[in-house]
Image (spheres, grey):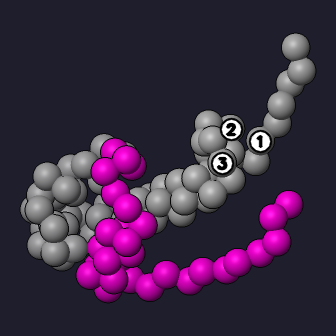
Amino acid sequence: MKTQTFKSVWDAIENTPEEAENMKLRSALMRDLQKHIEARGWKQAEAAEAFHVTQPRISDLLRGKISLFSLDTLVNMVAAAGLHIDMRVMEAA
């Protein structure tokens, strides 16, 4: 059996490079939003108010339910939180 090496778990489990890139971006935004909530010491209801979403959405975010969040939704939550996204596009390795 030949061993394969991947740069990311998403590269290993997604069917296409496009799907892997989408998941990488979504997971990074989710992590950053989780860190923001923790840094502020917010309860879920406080985060929901700040992000203009419901408390159950924050629960889904904190539980890592990535399939429930689109890139668009996460970008809107980041902006509502008063954060900014800095993006770079590079050649694939």
Asked if the residue at tag 1 contacts the one at tag 3, i.e. Cβ–Cβ closer than 8 Å, the answer is: no
Residue 9 seen in the figure: no
Identified by mark 2, the residue type is Ala
Q: Which mark is residue 22?
A: none
Between 13 and 84, the one lying in front of the other is: 13
Q: Residue at x 63, y 57 (%)?
A: 18
Of the two numbered discs 3 and 1 in the rendering, the one whose residue sits closer to the viewer: 3
Q: Secondary structure at mark 3?
A: loop
Q: Which mark is residue 6?
A: 1
Identified by mark 3, the residue type is Thr
For the C terminus, give its image quadrant.
Answer: bottom right
Between 89 and 55, the one lying in front of the other is: 89
Identified by mark 1, the residue type is Phe
Q: Is residue 73 located in the magenta-colored stretch of the structure? A: yes
Q: Earlier in the sequence, mark 3 or mark 1?
A: 1
Asked if the residue at tag 1 contacts the one at tag 2, i.e. Cβ–Cβ closer than 8 Å, the answer is: yes
Residue 29 at x, y percent in the picture:
45, 65
For the N terminus, give its image quadrant.
Answer: top right
- Report how far apart the C-alphas of labels 3 and 2 lie in the structure: 10 Å
Residue 35 at x, y percent in the picture:
39, 62
Q: Residue at x 81, y 64 (%)?
A: 92
Question: Residue 12 vs residue 33: left or right?
Answer: right
Q: Which residue is mark 3?
A: 16
Q: Which residue is mark 2?
A: 12
Going by the picture, which residue comes out furthest to the right? 2
- Report how far apart the C-alphas of labels 3 and 1 lie in the structure: 13 Å
Task: State which region is magenta.
Answer: 65-93
Question: Residue 92 vs residue 89: left or right?
Answer: right
